[in-house]
Amino acid sequence: MRRWHLPVLVAILTVTAVSLIVYKVRALGYPMTPAEEIQSWIIEARLSFEATGGAAKAELAIPLDPPGYSILDENFVSRGYGLQTERRSNNRVAIWSTRRPSGRQTLYYRATVTPHESKSLEQAVPALAAPPLYDELHSAAVNAILDEVRSKSADIATFSSLLMQMLARPTPDENAQLLLPRQASREDRVRTAIYVLAGAHIPARMARGLRLVDGARSAQVEAWIEVNNGQRWIPIDPDTGAHGYPPDFVMWWRGDTPLFSVERGRDAEVRFSVTRTMEEALETATRQAQLSESAVASYSLLALPVHTQNVYRSLLLIPVGALLIVFLRNVVGVQTFGTFMPVLIALAFRQTDLVAGVLLFSVLVTLGLAVRFYLEHLKLLLVPRLAAVVIIVILLMAFVSILSQRLRFEVGLSVALFPMVILAMTIERMSIVWEEHGPADAIKQGVGSLIVAAGCYLIMFDLRVEHFIFVFPESLLLVLALALLLGRYTGYRVTELLRFRALSEAIKR
């Protein structure tokens, strides 16, 4: 068991991290790259009417969980009106009311929607109302249509599609003509289909919505039919009999109830406008996850206050730099001052940029090292000597900033952001190595620390890495798994292979 303990632990960490990442990308729509945008639509309904005196009340159907879309935001513009929304059966209704309106009144409803994974329509089979009482003539026509469609269909879905195709023919047969009004519209065909399907004990209902056409100032409402097959509602196009809503269709309300109603008002009308816009993918995914009440989103870093998020944007990158150090030290064989000091130096480089940071760091360490050698002659104890180095480092930082200001070299002003304790410890450690192992080893470890710090900076603060780690913090489980695997590496380092290359070639001969 002890032999397999580490591989099993690594496998668990990997599967957990990958599963969470895939779920957040596929189910919640979190983007894997920064600055990614997705398409969204703004739909505006404008209800206007002429007030006729007295208290007025206006009602407008508004969308409720449209299939294939998520409602990211809603706005109601109605100055001087009271507003409330309520749910009625499968619909939502906005209700405006006011005491003494006068003149032309205009009310607005605006919704921002974005494509989302298709929601399955409600699964429950509704209680079927009693079939309509057909008169003798209509009964004969309905039965004839049902018999013809039944002979060509295999289930409720195909049955309903064939019925819609029959009613949508340019020249319907005599039975369909009897049931359809003259110059039948799309809504008329849907009502007729519901009327006929009731004779076959098949639940059906009307659904209406809008096509998303960019720049449409007067979008038209389209009627569809939804048929229940005993398990779910199936949308069917009244013109073609095709199943499913098209990707550019937003369902607005269901049933044969009117879109709007106005009390104490005349000449009422509703106009729809549609425009396309682009939304930041991360913000959109966060709002969608909140609307869906996902547990993963509830415990996400994105739910923290902004100032706390900014702290974690840097903090979560430290394990990435630590993994790079583990690889460079254990596999490549690069020598550095301390284990994680290069990561801290890389954090300082974020404020100065890489080239300027390396230059400033080298200048401060060189000057501090010269002062440190001078303090060695004073025979100070360790703690007082470190305190003296910290004081001198701060003075050097202030001097460099003042000199940079005089020379109009603005990058030098960022030197104050370098961690003074890190600089002091680097100077102390380098001086000790210099004394114990000579200047060659000290310079080698100093250069190695700068190289590793530069590598950490380039990887940690790449925008794509920073975005991915912050949005998917569970990816640190993968970093942990790799670090555990590298902890078992006992092979030769790259520097050792290069160092003993001549000996290896001699042995082969």
Image: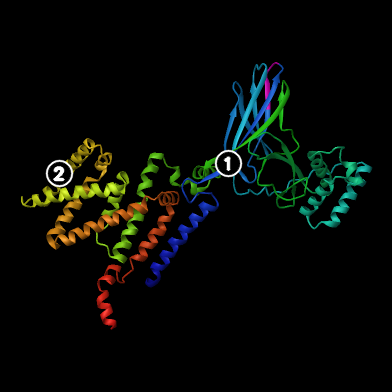
Q: Which colour scheme is used?
A: rainbow
Type of the residue with mark 1 = Ser
Q: Which quadrant of the figure contains the C terminus?
A: bottom left
Nearest to the observer: residue 446 or residue 315: 446
Left or right, residue 387 beside residue 306:
left
Q: Is residue 84 left or right of residue 1?
A: right
Lateral position of residue 497 relative to residue 216, left or right? left
Asked if the stretch drawn in magenta spans residue 233, the answer is no
Image vertical order of residue 386 relative to residue 306, above or below: below
Taking the spot 47% from the left edge, 61% from the top edge, the residue there is 15
**Residue 98: image location, x then y, percent:** 64, 20
Question: Residue 104: image x %, image y %?
Answer: 67, 19
Q: Identify the residue at horizontal 76%, vertical 53% (top origin).
A: 157
Q: How many labels does the image show?
A: 2
Q: What stretch is highlighted in magenta?
A: 53-58
Which class describes the residues within 10 Å of circle 1: few (<14), some (14-19), or many (20+)?
A: many
Question: Which residue appears at 35% of the width and 48% of the height?
Answer: 315
What's the residue at 64%, 18% (across, down)?
A: 99
Instruction: Kindly identify which numbered label has been placed on residue 40.
Output: 1
Query: Mark 2 to mark 1: distance in Å?
Result: 57 Å
SS label for mark 1 = strand
Q: Where is residue 199 in the image (x, y as percent from the top left)?
A: 85, 47
In this orientation, does residue 103 appear? Answer: yes
Quadrant of residue 276 in the image? top right
Question: Which quadrant, please, contains the N terminus?
Answer: bottom left
Q: Which residue lies furthest to the left in this view?
A: 378
Where residue 392 is drawn, which disc sits there? Answer: 2
**Mark 2 residue type:** Ile
Q: Is mark 2 on a helix, strand or loop?
A: helix
